[in-house]
Amino acid sequence: MLDIPTGLGWLYLDLNSYFASVEQQLNPQLRGRPVAVVPSNTEATCAIAASYEAKAHGVKTGTMIYQARKLCPGLVTVPARHDKYVEYHHKIMEQIDKHIPITKVCSIDEVACRLIGHEREEEKALEIGRNLKKAILQNVGPCLRSSVGIGPNRFLAKVASNLQKPDGLTVLYATELPERLAHLKLSDLPGIGRNMDARLSRAGINDITCFWNLDPKHVRRIWHSVEGERFWYALHGIETTTNDDPTRRTVGHSHVLAPNMRPRHKARLVARRLTLKAASRLRRLGYFARNYSLYVRFDIPKGDGRKYKWQMDIKIPLAEDSFSFLRALNILWQKMIEDNTPTHIKQLSVTFFGLVPAEKIMPDMFKQLDDPISKTQNRHSRLSVAMDNINKKYGLDTVVLGTLPETMSPFSGTKIAFTRIPEKAEFHE
């Protein structure tokens, strides 16, 4: 017999329409208007965030802008300013930390806080939730509304935060389930995407009540992974443990190109810029890398028989300097051309892997003295670090390797990924 927890243990805060809310906070003329945040000012792109005024018309994350304008003729599009979103993120974290310790920053706009002692009592937990929401509105900005969920474990606290948006405050007990969530679709639960929803449907599982009553081992078989069993237990309010290995394995950057940057000769400039950014970040984090990977997704029409993506890795001498990685890029770029790939590129990703912390490298002193390659690499490392320092002091791209048109920087700036919040220093790399 499963022992369902009866109390509360977590508080989850989710900022509502975060990117769009920050833009409305920064620009009062946008307040009360339908806003879509976009990666670039073109009708061919999609919304990466939408204000609640835009959502009321059916505009949501991922909606193509030309479609969004049909849904919402008064839509205002605003280019994303990721540095501002990170800046406001830190301001909000400071406010939260004044009221309760942050256990985990889950994304740029979501945090989870473990409740302890009398904080587990419903009234006290609700008081903390109200104080957090009030502190953010008063001390960071009145446009930055949030929804707070309180539940027995982190998963159900997140589910609770989604039950009332915007500006919600919801308590969810495991003992209220599955009835309390029976009105939701399985895909409304965080962690069940389109593919998993289809897989569950093929197994005859089409609603939360049915899923709730399954045997956890059965869920594991459907999932083809132990993660399915963990998900089942989490939905029942039971804490699950995962192996969160903090070891860094890769450093990289990715970018979807604006249409005018997609011809191959222009895309190469973006690939260089991403490589230089990743190299600078690698040095700041204190790592060397022995592998370089280039991923390319091509801009080809539907039905085109050619391959729509290309990827290749190359092994290099253990390095941290920008020159080594640019040489690797040149080799892979030429190989991509030789493979007769399409000439227009939609997305680029560069990744360094095979990372080794700088403090674990024990160079052979005599090899360093005699090896001309090592001597050159050392000079390049010193030059790369010097350039990092100049750019940090005087601004992004004060000095660069080769030529970099002024118009290039906006196309390859630091972006926020769902699972990673950039550090402030990245906006200067």
Image (cartoon, helix red, strand yellow):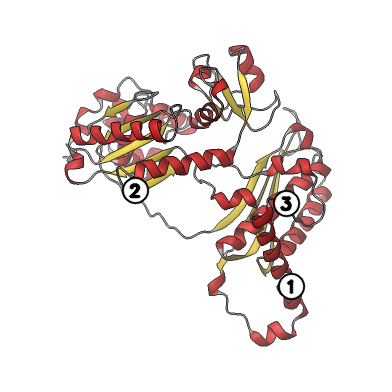
Instruction: Tell me if 223 is positioned left or right of 79 in this view.
Output: left
Of helix, strand and loop, which one carries label 2? loop
Q: Quadrant of the N terminus?
A: top left
Mark 1, residue position: 379
Kind of residue indicated by mark 3: Asp
Residue appearing at x 74%, y 85% in the figure:
370
Mark 1 Cα within 10 Å, few/some/many (few <14, many 20+)?
Answer: few
> What residue appears at the point 70 percent right and 25 percent down from the top-left corner?
44
Q: Nearer the viewer, mark 3 or mark 1?
A: 3
Give above or below for 209 relative to 388: above
Residue 161 in the image: above or below residue 369: above
Q: Are marks 2 and 1 in contact (CB under 8 Å)?
A: no
Residue type, numbered disc 1: Arg
Q: Which residue corresponds to mark 3?
A: 397
Judging by the rendered image, the residue that carries numbered circle 2 is 103
Q: CA distance from mark 3 to mark 1?
A: 20 Å
Q: Residue 405: x, y in percent?
A: 80, 45
